[in-house]
Image (cartoon, rainbow, N blue to C red):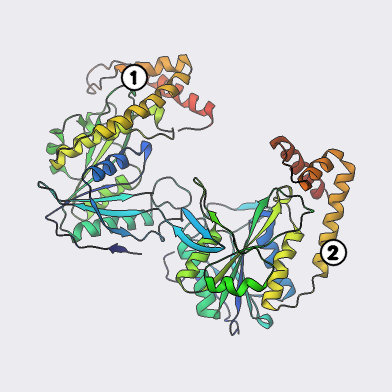
């Protein structure tokens, strides 16, 4: 089980930005878009075979020529401001058919990613994922930020359109981040790295759809680029977000009008502090969740 | 379990340069289990090793098959007089790479296996009266050359379709290739309406190749009898149920059936074979 680094770039205390697939692929799209815009260069990978089942076989004239595995690659970019290392995992290593990584394999992978970070004297890590929220797809998604150390809270409070868990009604500062996008934070803490997970909001009724949600990726990227002090043009992501939004709207119109009426109320959610009266009542919130659950159960999927 | 070698060897077999035949227990048409059982029965295979299940299978309970509780098993048998190692196993659910390497560790390091044959079945839209073909996929051009003297389809082109994953057999073949071990994956098509049952014709096709290639000198009279009996049963269904006969005739003429017709054919054949004709 190992790392393969093809190059040894000279990097000055780089920042690691890592992501794996998750709900709406919000984090993955954000990180991969940034990697693409900055034209970061591939310099290594985690050997995949001990973590993954292969994804493609190529047989030619009766000879097994190639077996392709999900990729787990490292990229680097030297910028005027900060040097960056990207890690992008095409899949989360799962055991026994689970969707998100957990257990020994996940821990091993998180440590391998951080081994590279350590090798290049990186001290700051960002990961990114999705936050399933009582919000509407017409609303600009916020970014939920979870740091792994107290010292980062003040910094996060300066980020625009970003909330801490304690800002979210009913959470009391608690929650969990499933899979490697979350696990990496914990492993980073153990190994003395500062780390922040940035999660773009996805409406609760979209979480089970086989659709990406680039609108939230854009919110994440806005926060990330601020944190990294780099300016990037997000026009391409806007185009993708518009395309997906049209498909979401088509889906939305198929939802029975009674359920849709409940979901429409989410357009007016303004995220009050726990002490303030909310724009939708607790009773309404419960009903929305029940309606969404019923609708997806009826469709025989989702969720 | 995190031990380096997740297998137990009860007794080291006395083999010089054997081949390994490997079959999975939950195969289409039960092919892997039937062929490996047959080899062990005819060639007096003796169990000598097993892979421990705890790292590779979900041990949250047991499955039930044929009214019996089943626990995952991964066992090696030695057929000493025939220089053959047989491996019969449930398909692992996790840690595939480590599992497949463990199989090859036992085969190569403890038995000096020189080449491996892994068994697989494909669902076919052909009728049961169509002669079975045998496809071979190898992991080296040398092996392809060696197989040229046998009645095999050896020129298959294939790429895993989007949304699907390669077979465990392809994974094993690749692991063997990395370890410089010759490997052959054998695939026999089984008519779709026998896929959940058994297909002795398909078993015979595979076994005949192994018999010839490995010089096993097996007497197939019992399997031939089984084939005759199944053919008779299928002929009975056709004569009793004209609709089923019509479906099979159409398949024999290379016509396709509707999804509903396929479903009816499968159900009627399975019911008939389960009831014993």
Taking the spot 20% from the left edge, 63% from the top edge, the residue there is A8
* Subunit bearing disc 2: B
Taking the spot 74% from the left edge, 73% from the top edge, the residue there is B42
Q: Looking at the image, is B192 positioned above or below residue B180?
A: above
Q: Quadrant of residue B229?
A: bottom right
Seen in the image, is A256 located left or right of residue A102? right
Tag nearer the camera, 2 or 1: 2
The residue lying toward the viewer, choosing from B9 and A214, is A214
Near mark 1 (Cα within 10 A), the count class, few <14, some 14-19 or many ≥20, is many
Instruction: Compute the Cα span from label 2 to label 1.
Output: 70 Å
Q: Looking at the image, is A14 positioned above or below residue B81?
A: above
Taking the spot 86% from the left edge, 45% from the top edge, the residue there is B238
Residue named by callout 1: A266
Q: Looking at the image, is B8 positioned above or below residue B54?
A: below
Residue named by callout 2: B225
Q: Which image quadrant: the N terminus of chain A?
A: bottom left
């Amino acid at each position: 089980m190992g790392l393969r680094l093809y190059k040894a770039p000279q990097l000055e205390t780089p920042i690691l930005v890592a992501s794996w697939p998750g709900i709406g692929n919000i984090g993955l799209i954000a990180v991969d878009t940034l990697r693409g815009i900055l034209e970061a260069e591939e310099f290594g990978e985690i050997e995949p075979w001990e973590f993954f089942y292969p994804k493609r076989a190529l047989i030619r004239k009766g000879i097994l020529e190639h077996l392709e595995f999900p990729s787990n690659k490292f990229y680097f970019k030297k910028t005027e401001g900060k040097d960056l290392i990207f890690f992008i995992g095409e899949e989360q290593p799962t055991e026994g058919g689970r969707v998100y990584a957990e257990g020994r394999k996940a821990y091993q992978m998180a440590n391998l990613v951080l081994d590279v970070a350590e090798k290049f004297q990186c001290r700051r890590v960002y990961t990114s994922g999705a936050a399933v929220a009582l919000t509407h797809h017409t609303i600009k998604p916020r970014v939920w930020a979870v740091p792994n150390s107290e010292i980062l809270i003040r910094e996060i409070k300066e980020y625009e359109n970003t909330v801490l868990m304690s800002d979210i009604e009913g959470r009391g500062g608690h929650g969990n981040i499933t899979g490697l996008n979350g696990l990496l934070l914990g492993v980073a803490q153990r190994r003395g790295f500062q780390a922040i997970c940035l999660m773009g909001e996805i409406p609760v009724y979209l979480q089970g759809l086989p659709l990406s949600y680039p609108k939230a990726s854009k919110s994440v990227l806005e926060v990330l680029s601020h944190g990294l002090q780099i300016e990037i043009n997000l026009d391409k992501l806007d185009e993708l977000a518009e395309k997906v939004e049209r498909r979401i709207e088509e889906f939305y119109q198929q939802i029975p009008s009674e359920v849709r009426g409940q979901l429409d109320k989410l357009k007016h959610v303004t995220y009050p502090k726990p002490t303030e009266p909310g724009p939708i009542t607790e009773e309404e919130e419960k009903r929305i969740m029940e309606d969404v659950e019923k609708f997806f159960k009826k469709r025989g999927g989702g969720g | 379990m995190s031990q380096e070698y997740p297998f137990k060897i009860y007794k080291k077999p006395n083999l010089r340069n054997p081949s390994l035949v490997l079959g999975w227990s939950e195969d289409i048409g039960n092919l892997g289990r039937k062929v490996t059982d047959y080899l062990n029965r005819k060639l007096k295979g003796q169990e000598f090793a097993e892979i421990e299940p705890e790292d590779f299978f979900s041990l949250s309970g047991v499955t039930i098959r044929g009214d019996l509780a089943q626990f995952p098993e991964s066992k090696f048998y030695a057929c000493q007089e025939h220089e053959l190692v047989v491996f019969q196993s449930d398909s692992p659910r996790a840690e595939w790479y480590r599992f497949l390497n463990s199989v090859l560790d036992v085969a190569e390091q403890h038995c000096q296996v020189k080449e491996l044959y892994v068994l697989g079945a494909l669902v076919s839209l052909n009728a049961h009266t169509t002669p079975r073909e045998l496809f071979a996929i190898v992991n080296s051009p040398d092996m392809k050359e060696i197989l040229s003297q046998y009645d095999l389809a050896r020129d298959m082109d294939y790429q895993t379709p989007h949304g699907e994953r390669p077979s465990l057999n392809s994974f094993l073949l690749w692991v063997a290739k990395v370890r410089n071990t010759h490997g052959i994956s054998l695939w026999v098509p089984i008519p779709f309406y026998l896929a959940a049952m058994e297909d002795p014709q398909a078993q015979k096709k595979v076994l005949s190749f192994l018999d010839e290639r490995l010089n096993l000198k097996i007497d197939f009279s019992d399997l031939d009898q089984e084939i005759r009996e199944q053919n008779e049963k299928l002929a009975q269904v056709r004569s009793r149920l004209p609709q089923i006969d019509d479906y099979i005739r159409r398949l024999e003429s290379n016509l396709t059936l509707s999804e509903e017709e396929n479903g009816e054919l499968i159900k009627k054949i399975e019911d008939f074979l389960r009831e014993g004709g």
